[in-house]
Structure formats: structure tokens, C-alpha cells
Amino acid sequence: MRALLALASAVLASAAIMYLVSMRVGESLGGPVFSARLALIFILLGAAGLLLPRLGRGTLPMRLWSWITVAVAVNVIPVVMETVNAYAGRDVFSPDLIFVFFILVFIPVLVVIGSLYTGFKRQGFEFARSASTTVLPSLVVFAAVTLFVLIVPLAASDVSPGVRISDIFALVVQVSALCIVAFMAVTIGKGDAGRPFLFISLALVCIMVQTILTAHIRLVGMMSTTEPADFFLHLAYYLLILAAYFQYRLSSGPA
């Protein structure tokens, strides 16, 4: 598992360098950038392959990591399509078809978010009542801004239907996910046992940030193959690998 983590760190660093270089050279690094993302996905699947056999069947971690593995495995399909398009320099696969697969990825993601919440409740964690007064107003403002600045303009834009539907669906799902993750923030990350939940939640936040930035970039018509905002996806995969690593360490001990 440590070797996979080291490899993932090297791939993430390489992706960061390529994104920086692409700001000067343009689209020419699109293929390698998508290849790096695909490499992180396969490393994550390898980490899940090592982790899953160590988890007790019927427990929350087994269900949680099984759904994460399903989501990542489904995600291989659209990322491979995007990689082919990037190397070909044209749309070998329709962007609408690619985004249909990305929508399918959100089904297991929703299960993961629900599992995080119910898992904390079953473990006896109590969510501070003060979170309702401190977190809720900010979430309402954030949701309203997202609605009027991104979702409404996207619905009225001339972006292709498949991309438009996917972006709106992703925004709605991820704003909802943020609400759940924000209320869990008062307990996430406590001690070694909380680290896997912490990194999974941070990965969800990275995916949400990428979706919001990408939706805005599409609206202003500045989207490119090596869009720097997509680096948050690479970071999300890396955070999931970290979560798997710490879960693997926990499963080696009495906990």
C-alpha cells in the first residue's frame, strides 16, 4: 500500500507540473494530463483491491469502500473516452455520451455520502446543535448563489444538452453533499479512526470545487482540454488513495 501511495504522489506531482506547463504550451499536453488522471484511478482501484479483503463483511467500511470502488470503476469509462479525445485532438466520443457516464458516477457517490452520515450516527457521534446556527446560514447563501450564478444561466445557455444536464445535475448533487459534509465536520477527523472519513470528505469537496469552476468556465466560453480547474479531480483521487491507505492501516490493528 505504501508503494501505491508513493506512486500516486509522483503521478499527482507530475500532473501538477503538466497543468502549469500547459498554461504556456496550450492543448498539447491534453493526452498526458488525462493519462495521469487515468493512472490515479487505476492506483485507487489497486488500493481498494488491497483494502476490501481486509474489511469485515456487513460493516459500514465494507459497504462504503465497495460503493467507492464501484464509482471509480464506472468513472474509468468516461475518463478513457476523454483521454482518447485528447490524444486524437477531436471528439472521437461525443461529449454528451461522456457526460452521461459521469452522471452515472454520482449514483454510488450519493450512497457513499449517505453511508458517511449514517455511519457516524451508528458509531454514537453527536452533531453539535450549534452547527445549525453556524453552518446553515452559510450553506443557504452558498446554495442561492450557485442557483442564480450557475444553474439558472446554464439552463438558459447554448451549451450542448448532455453537458448542460450533467453540469446542472452535478451542481445540485454536490451542493446537497456539501450540506451533509458540513454538518459532519464537527466530528470528522477525530483521531486515527476519523482519518479515512476526513479524506473521503475532502475528496468530495475537491470534486465539488472542480464542478463549480468548470460550470463557470463553460458559461464564459473559455474551456480547454488542459483546464487547470480539472486538477482538483486529480487531487480528489489522491485524497481517496490516502483515505484507503489510512483505512488499510486501521484494518491491520485491533480497531
Image: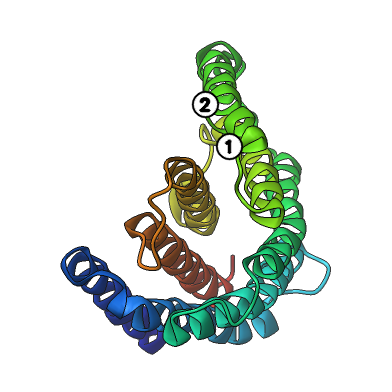
- For the residue pair 200 and 192, the one nearer the viewer reads as 200
Spatial CA distance of label 1 from label 2 is 18 Å
Mark 1 lies on residue: 178
At label 1, the amino acid type is: Leu
Residue located 35% across and 67% down the image: 226
Q: Residues within 10 Å of mark 1 (few under 14, many from 20)?
A: some
- Spot occupied by residue 224 in the image (x, y as percentages of width and height): 38, 62
Q: Quadrant of the C terminus?
A: bottom right
- Spot occupied by residue 84 in the image (x, y as percentages of width and height): 52, 85
Residue located 65% across and 69% down the image: 98
Q: Earlier in the sequence, mark 1 or mark 2?
A: 2
Tell me: residue 166, above or below residue 43.
Answer: above
| Residue 38 placement, left or right of 81 | left
Residue located 30% across and 78% down the image: 29
At label 2, the amino acid type is: Val
Tell me: residue 172, above or below residue 87.
Answer: above
| Residue 72 placement, left or right of 4 | right
- Indicate how the structure is coloured in the image: rainbow
Mark 2 lies on residue: 149
| Residue 62 placement, left or right of 46 | right
Residue located 47% across and 56% down the image: 199
Q: Residues within 10 Å of mark 2 (few under 14, many from 20)?
A: few
Question: Tag 1's secondary structure?
Answer: helix
Question: Tag 2's secondary structure?
Answer: helix
Tell me: residue 212, above or below residue 97.
Answer: above
